Every structure is written in C-alpha cells, then in structure tokens.
Image (cartoon, helix red, strand yellow):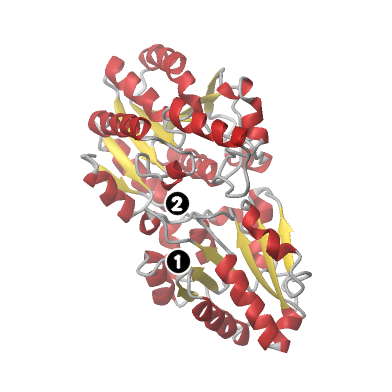
Amino acid sequence: MSKKVLIVAYYWPPSGGGGVQRWVKFVKYLPGFDIEPIVFTPENPTFSFKDDTLKQDVDPATTVVKLPIWEPYSLLGFLKKKGTERQGQALDKGKKSWLDHLIIWIRGNFFIPDPRVFWVKPASKFLVEYIQKNKVDVIVTTGPPNSMHLIGKRVKQKTNVKWIADFRDPWSEWSQYKHLKVGKLALSIHRSMEKSVFSLSDVVIATNPVAQEDFRRLGAKHVVSITNGVDPSDFPVLQDKRKESVFLLSHIGTIDDLRDPRPFLEAFKALCNENENFAALARFRMTGIISGSYLEDYWNDPVLKGRLIVEDYVPHHEILQRVEDSDVLLLLLSDFDNALGCMPGKFFEYLYFSRPILALVPDGHQIQKDIAELQMGLSTNNVEVDKIKSALLQLFEQRKDENHTPSDAMEYTRQKLTSKLAEVIHALD
C-alpha cells in the first residue's frame, strides 16, 4: 500500500553539500518503492554553498512545500562574515578577537540547539494542519540542524503521526561543541532535547553502525543504520583525464581540525626532499571548504609551493570529474570524539572509482578494514608521519596500476540504500 512521507529538511537545492545529496537521492528513488515523498523546507534559508546541479535529481512532480524562516543572522550578521559558522565547516582555529570569541559563545549557549530554533514553532503549527489535511502517513526529520527534530517532536505530540528522525551527525556528543564554547547548562539542554527526540520518535536512523550503537547507549529505542552512498547515474559522462607527467593526489571536501592535513603535508614534503622523481611528478589538490589558518605556513613553503593546488567548493558533478582525474584519493579523519562513528560520504564515491585510496583515519576504523578487504589502496593513522610517508611512496611506485571497481561498492548505491529506507517506512503501521 502506497504511503505519503513528509521530509523536513533545512538544506535542499540549490543548497550544496553532502547532507543535501543524502535526501535528494532518497527522494529521487522513494517513488520506486511505492512511497510518495513530500519535502518541507525553508523558503529563505541561510546557506554558504550553492549547487544548482542537484536540482536535476529532483523530479518536477515532487511536491516541495516552503515556509519562510527567521534566523538570528539578521541581528548577528557579522557572525557569518567572521566565519564562525559555515555550512559543512568546522570552526577555524586561527586567531580571533574578543568579539569573535563572544559571538561564538553566544552562538553556542543561547541558540539551542542551533540558530534555526526560531523556525520550530511556526513550522510545527503549519505542518500539523498540513499533515491532517493531506493525510500524511510518516514524517521524517533530518539534522543537523537539530531544530528539525524539534519540529518532528511537536508534530508527533499534536498528531501522533509516525516519525523517523535521521541523524547525519551526533547531537549531544558532537565534537564541535568545544569550539562553540558550549557550557554545562547548554549541554544539559542539548541532552534533554536529544533524549526527548529519542523517546518520542518511532525510528532513529544513524549513518553507520558505530553511531547506531552510540544512539542506543544514549537512549534511542529503535535505531537502524543506513549509510550514505553513491549514485551510478552521476558517472556516465566522466572521462579519464589523468596525465602521465603528473602524480595527482586529491582531497575532496572539508579541511579543518577534524580532517587535519598537516601530518600528510609533512610526509608529502619529506618525500619531496628524499625522492627526486616524486618531487618532479607529485601534486596535491584540495578541493572544497578549506578551514584552518594553521595551514598558512604551508602555502609559501619553498618545497610545497607549486605542488599544492587549492580550489574552492565546486558543484557535485565537477567534484566527480576531479575524483576521476586523480591518481590517488586522500581521505582524512583525525582522532577526535566520535571519530570511529564518522563515515565520510565521499568514501562511498571513492569506492566507486578505480583509483587507490590513501585513508588516514584512527586505528581500528571501519574504513581501514574496508580498504584492506576490497584492496582499494592503503590506510594508516593520521598521526605518524613516517607511516604516512611509507604508504605514500608505495602508492607512488604502484601508480597507474589499474584497479577494478569492487562489486561490494554496489551495496552502497543510493537506490539500494533507499530500498532499506523504504522497508523502515513500510514497517510503520
């Protein structure tokens, strides 16, 4: 029997980023599983990155309902300008003035759970009427921002509609709270809100098995894991443009203290000093959101200068072409709280390409096991420069060897993952 599902998502095209792609793809494939998706999103959201190409995945027949939102950036307009909060970006650890620190503290301790909290009341009121009028079977909220889950909570209390809360990141144990200077009182409020969402929601979705167990530990009853994935339909026009004269390593996505490139850069620099052939051919390209003034010393380093390529955020289809052009794909993940429960979305797209992956992740991470089993490259921790240098040299010496796309990557196609989501939805009676 067909079901009507309403998805509450703050980020929606033309907004860009991995969080947008997750639900754009779910909405794209849900109709094939006898589910009618309806998207509810702000009419005037604040987002940093635009990607109009993602609109191509949204069927014109999909119902997208919009409601205006008021956000405190109109009062603290300099908040964004100072870079204290950017979509998909952790806080920059560079020098800050007393005003910067004050703004960060206000953001972390007054806007709970986030600056979109002022949309909760009007959005909930609107949705209660909409759901009753349109006979919606299930509501899905996806966060961050976690205010979306507070909307789901209110709607659940008013209508008793079945509710799925999708968590793309941790909530009360989010590692960035220390950078936002979140105090004990504010953190206790976060935990209370999280607990109420876990208690009232019918299903909680995590993006990997480690996060699934974390949510269970924190009180969620029915938790399922549905990872991010890859959509084969994104790939047909790509061409292999690798150059024999260059050994190109690429990192796609955010660079910050959670994905700290400094140990890699030290290994890269050391290898340039030790190996003339590597120095002549190697280039390192970073494409995406580059945070962290701690990288300033590297930009003008005499060894690295001319070998580092830095690009700003680009649309998703251009990102995929950059992945295809690379000889080695770099995946960075520092050893922070919840690191073992973090499974970057780009990993699944990396898997789909016939390119070696160099994964620098905490020891024991699932990614290390996956890369070894699939023979898709090498992995080590993101701390020991000598081990990184050794892995880098090995990949350089094996360059241009052809790998095959592992069949296991097909387990992570967006269509197959949507089928898992559809099973969860249809099971809600």
Residue in the picture at 44% in, 44% down: 178
Q: Residue furthest front?
A: 98
Give residue 426's quadrant in the image: top left
> Residue beneath label 1, please?
361
Left or right: 6 in relation to 244 = left
Q: Eyeballing the image, is 259 above or below 53?
A: below
Residue 307 appears in view: yes
Element on which disc 2 rests: loop
Element on which disc 1 rests: loop
Residue in the picture at 62% in, 49% down: 94
Residue in the picture at 45% in, 25% down: 110
**Which marked residue is nearer to the observer: mark 2 or mark 1?**
1
Residue 1 appears in view: no
Spot occupied by residue 404 in the image (x, y as percentages of width and height)? 53, 75
Cα separation between marks 2 and 1: 18 Å
- Identify residue type, mark 1: Val
> Residue beneath label 2, please?
228
Nearer-the-camera pick, 58 or 292: 292
Quick one: label 2 or label 1, which is nearer the N terminus? Answer: 2
Give residue 237's quadrant in the image: bottom right
Spot occupied by residue 300 in the image (x, y as percentages of width and height)? 76, 65
Q: Residues within 10 Å of mark 2 (few under 14, many from 20)?
A: many
Q: Residues within 10 Å of mark 1 (few under 14, many from 20)?
A: many
Residue 308 is labelled as none
Spot occupied by residue 91 in the image (x, y as percentages of width and height)? 55, 45
Nearer-the-camera pick, 164 or 175: 175
- Identify residue type, mark 2: Asn
Q: Eyeballing the image, is 83 above or below 264?
A: above
Marks counted in the figure total 2
Q: Eyeballing the image, is 254 above or below 44?
A: below
